[in-house]
């Protein structure tokens, strides 16, 4: 099983908004009762690759107000989903409806994180019992 976490860089600090993250840390879940998470790599988010303005800490408050008629914006979300299409889960603090829809279309389930950790590996340890 593979799990993606939106991160700001290779420090693996979780990004606040999955749709505006510059990278995804992809982990492979191993073990049974005693789970461990092996970092496969950090992948760029193609949705924001050419953005002149990157959202970082303030991105928790960004809301996506694009509707079904904004085809280019929706396609951008789809490219993001394709970047992690081999994952089973995407852990998020926040994700807009377009992110959720794009992930669902490739079979990725969103897992909400409301805890206090900021490091992706610590977050996964906290959530480990929820991955089945």
Image (tube, rainbow, N blue to C red):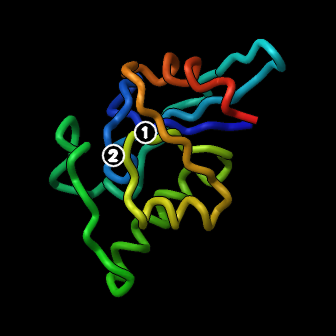
Q: Residue at x 40, y 52 (%)?
A: 95
- Asked if residue 41 lies left or right of residue 17, the reply is right
Name the residue carrying label 1: 6
Q: Looking at the image, is 67 positioned above or below residue 39?
A: below
Quadrant (top left, top right, bottom left, bottom right) of the C terminus:
top right
Could you say where residue 53 lies in the image, as x and y percent from the top left? 16, 52
Dot 1 and dot 2 residues touching (CB under 8 Å): yes
- Asked if residue 32 lies left or right of residue 89, the reply is right
Q: Looking at the image, is 1 positioned above or below residue 74?
A: above
Name the residue carrying label 2: 17
Could you say where residue 75 lies in the image, as x and y percent from the top left? 43, 73
- Asked if residue 127 lies left or right of residue 94, the reply is right
Give the quarter of the image for residue 40: top right
Quadrant (top left, top right, bottom left, bottom right) of the N terminus:
top right
In this rendering, the label closer to the viewer, 1 or 2: 2
Q: Nearer the viewer, residue 65 or 75?
A: 65
Q: Residue furthest bottom?
A: 69
Label 1 sits on a secondary structure element that is strand
Q: Nearer the viewer, residue 16 or 25?
A: 16
Disc with the residue nearer the chain's start (1 vs 2): 1
Give the quarter of the image for residue 127: top right
């Amino acid at each position: 099983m593979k799990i993606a976490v939106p991160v700001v860089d290779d420090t693996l600090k979780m990004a606040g908004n999955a749709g505006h993250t510059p990278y995804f840390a992809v982990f492979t879940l191993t073990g049974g009762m005693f789970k461990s998470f092996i970092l496969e790599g950090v992948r760029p988010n193609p949705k924001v690759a050419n953005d002149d303005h990157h959202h970082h800490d303030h991105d928790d408050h960004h809301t996506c107000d694009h509707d079904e008629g904004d085809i280019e914006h929706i396609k951008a979300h789809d490219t993001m989903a394709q970047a992690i299409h081999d994952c089973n889960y995407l852990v998020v603090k926040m994700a807009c409806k377009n992110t959720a829809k794009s992930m669902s279309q490739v079979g990725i389930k969103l897992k909400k994180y409301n805890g206090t950790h900021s490091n992706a590996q610590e977050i996964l340890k906290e959530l480990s019992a929820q991955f089945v």
